[in-house]
Structures are given as structure tokens and as C-alpha cells.
Amino acid sequence: MSDKNKIFNTLIKTYVFFSLTVGITVVILLVILNFQMKQKFDNTVLSNLRANEIVRQDYSNIRSDAIESFNGWVEILDENLHVIYVKGKKQDNSFAYTEKELNSLFYDQKKNLYQTSLAPFKTENGKTAYCLIKIPKTYIKQEFTVTSAAKDHITVFTTLLVQTFLLFLLLFGINVYIYSRWMAMKITNPLLSIANGIRNITNGYYYKRIHFKANYELMKIQNYFNLMAEKLEKTEKDKKQLEESKQRMLVHISHDLKTPITTIQGYVEALQMGLIKEEAKKKKALHIIHTKTRLVTELIEDVFELSKLESSDYPFATESLDISEFIREISAEYYWLFEEKYFHFQFEIPPREILVSFNYTLLYRAVSNVLSNALKYNSKGTNVSISLIEDTQKIYINITDDGIGIPSPIKEKVFEAFFRGDQSRQSDGGTGLGLTISKHIVEKHGGQIYLHIDEGKTKFQITLPKAGYNKNLAQN
């Protein structure tokens, strides 16, 4: 998302939009007020105070009411500037003017007692005449705002001003509402969605996500929030699975311990009570007791080992060793065990040295657990092979057999604690923790263990990083 979508830019845009809208509103209202004032005042009595507005050819019909309301009068002068007609109450003694005297009437001097207005016109007989208006200056200043006509103008002006102000308030309110809704859509609504998402997380609804379109910063918050919710959901699922696994482990441990201990207890009581008298049967009973005791010991040791491996701070030392030599040694040991059970055992190991950082004892147990399972659960004639392959960063230990196989539906469960497979792989006394321990050991080394089932063959693949690439191990 580009920087154009940041909240700062949005606020600038909305502020400019708001200011322009208010400014345009004020301009429009001023234009409307001016238009209304012209409509109200252009044809009112105020326009009748100017000579060019009231003059006409038949000067006897001149409307002088407005002028006379201010104690003024109208004089009609002939072309020689002699007064030939007066309308209103004349207050001076001038009945003829020189051109200089007439011009002096318009000078802004204190000796001029009257406000004058002059307009030439043609009479009905075509002669040139002049319309002269005189209004006392003092009287205009004192009486102009108190006449009925002036009061009417003030009332009209005040009414227009109030109407314009009310219209401004209405338009301003609409503008504020639109601006608020716009800001709510851009900021408030996303924040409300985030608040609802936080409430869902607080209530344990980790599967719920928030979805909205907003500015760059809010979209980043949404992405990080959904990522957090996803991780919390995964953590909660892992927690539940761990609790279920622990509960299942307790059930399995109880069961696996109860069975041999019950057997041991039964034979011990029989020997104590003298129920077994024959020497051969006594030896057989002691052998069974010894076997079951070893099974209990092995189970306890495996559980203890697994609990240590599951601890994140379990310490173990590693050193850079030749993994090729390691595989040769374990292959040599198991070769005779497979031969005794009539298995066909093959190995493929590079002759060169390949350095890997690992703990010899722990990795030996991880690989031997897989080989022991192949030896334990398959019948004679089974082909078993172990191979070592390398690339630039990893090595691959492949253990393959073509025995009874593992059904695909339980492929993902073989590394779970106490899992022993279906009826074709019934336990002959194993703890069911071998592959689980192997998985933890390999992961402690920064590697992975996989199960591949293809064309009747079962392949366990262990991957380990070469020396210098073991990042996960360094973190542990």
C-alpha cells in the first residue's frame, strides 16, 4: 500500500475538503444576501433621492415624497439656470444661479448646507432644463435613520441577515455531518472493528479475524492483528493437543505398567505361597518375572528420556564427526542381527568423510530405534537397506524395508507416544516410544524425520544439517 493512503494524508485531504466546503458555502450565502438586498432596496425610496431617478419631461409629476420626507425640495432650472418650478418647501432664497454658484453646490464644504443632486433633461417642448434636488445635510444626518422608511430598511436588512445566518448554520451542520461520516468511514469504523477483534480474542475466539479497508497504518494493524490471532489459535490448538497427549500418555503408562506388574505380582505370590513346586516351572516363573521387570525398567527409562528430550533447555554436547563412519559402525552391528532372522540387509555409504555436528549416543539411539522396528515387526525374507546421501547443506539417512508396511491412514501417527500401529504390527513388549524418542533426538540436532510409503516400501528419512549449517541446534 502506497504512502498516499496514510492517515496523515487522509486528514490533510479531509481538512482541505472541509475548509473549501465552508468557504464555498460562505461565498454562496454572501452572493444570495447581496442579490436579496438588491431585490429589496433597488426599487425602494432610497433610489428616489437622486435627481436622475426622479426626473421626467412633465416635471409637474415628479415624485418628491421621499425627498420631502427629509425636508428637501426639487427645483427645475431653465437653460439660463433660473428657477422656474419648485416642488416641496423651499428653504433658501436662491431663484437663479450662475454656473459657478451651481458648481459650488457640489463642493464638500462646510458652508454648503444642503446635499444636492443635479440631472439635465429635455422638457416637453424640447428645451433643455435641469432638475436640482436639495436636502439639508444636518437634517439628513439626524433624521435619516429615524424615519419610517429608514426603519423599514433596517428591518428588511436584519431579516435578510438572520435568514442568511440560519441558512449558513444549516449548511454548516450538513457539512459537519458529511465530514464526520467520512472520517468515521476512514478511521472510526476500522478502529471499532479492531476493538471488536480484541474483545473476541479476550473471550477466547481466536479463530475470528477482522476485515476492513482503510489507510496504510490501520491496514498494517489489521494484518498484524490477524497474524497474532492466527498464532494464538495455533498455540491454543497445540496446547489442547499437548494436554490430550499428556492425558493419553498417562493412560498408556498406567496400562503398560499395570500389565507386567500384575503378572510379576501374580508369580511372586504363587512362589511365596508354594503353589509352584516343580523346579522347571519355578525357573520359568522367575524368567517371566525377570522379563517383565526389564520391560518395566525399559518403559520407565524411555519415559524419563522422552521427558528430558521434550524440555527446551535439555543440554547435550555435540561434536563434528564423520557421519559416514557412524553409519558404517551401526550398519556393521545390525548386519548380524538381520542375518540371524534371515533378513536381506544392504547398505550404501559414501567412502569419503562427511562432517556433521551430532551427539553420538543420542543419534545412535535415534537410528537404532528405526532399525529395531524394522527388525521387530517384519518377517524373515524382508529386504532392509540403509543409505547415506549428501547435498551442499544436508545429509539424508534413508532406512527402507519392503516388509508388512504401514497403512497410509496411520502414517501421521507413527511418531506419537505409545502408538504401536494396527494389528499387523502388534507389540511384542515394546514401549511404543521408540519413534517418538527418535523424532525428538533428530529435531534436537536441527533436523527432521519423515515417513514415506510408496509401492509397498516403507522409508524413514532422517535429514541433518552439515557442520556449519546447524542453525536450529545453535538456537537450542
Image (cartoon, grey):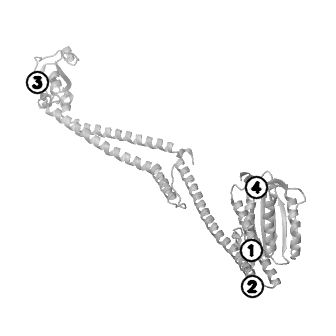
The three-letter amino acid code for the residue at tag 3 is Tyr
- The residue wearing badge 1 is 406
> CA–CA distance between discs 2 and 1?
44 Å
For discs 3 and 4, the disc positioned in front in the rendered view: 4
The three-letter amino acid code for the residue at tag 2 is Leu
| Residue 367 versus residue 5 in the image, above or below | below
- The residue wearing badge 2 is 275
Look at 75% across and 60% down and name the residue there. Answer: 442
- The residue wearing badge 4 is 316
Which of the two discs, 4 and 2, labels the residue nearer the N terminus? 2
Which of the two discs, 4 and 1, labels the residue nearer the N terminus? 4
Which of the two discs, 3 and 4, labels the residue nearer the N terminus? 3
Q: Is residue 422 visible?
A: no
> CA–CA distance between discs 3 and 4?
130 Å
> CA–CA distance between discs 3 and 2?
164 Å
Q: Secondary structure at mark 1?
A: loop
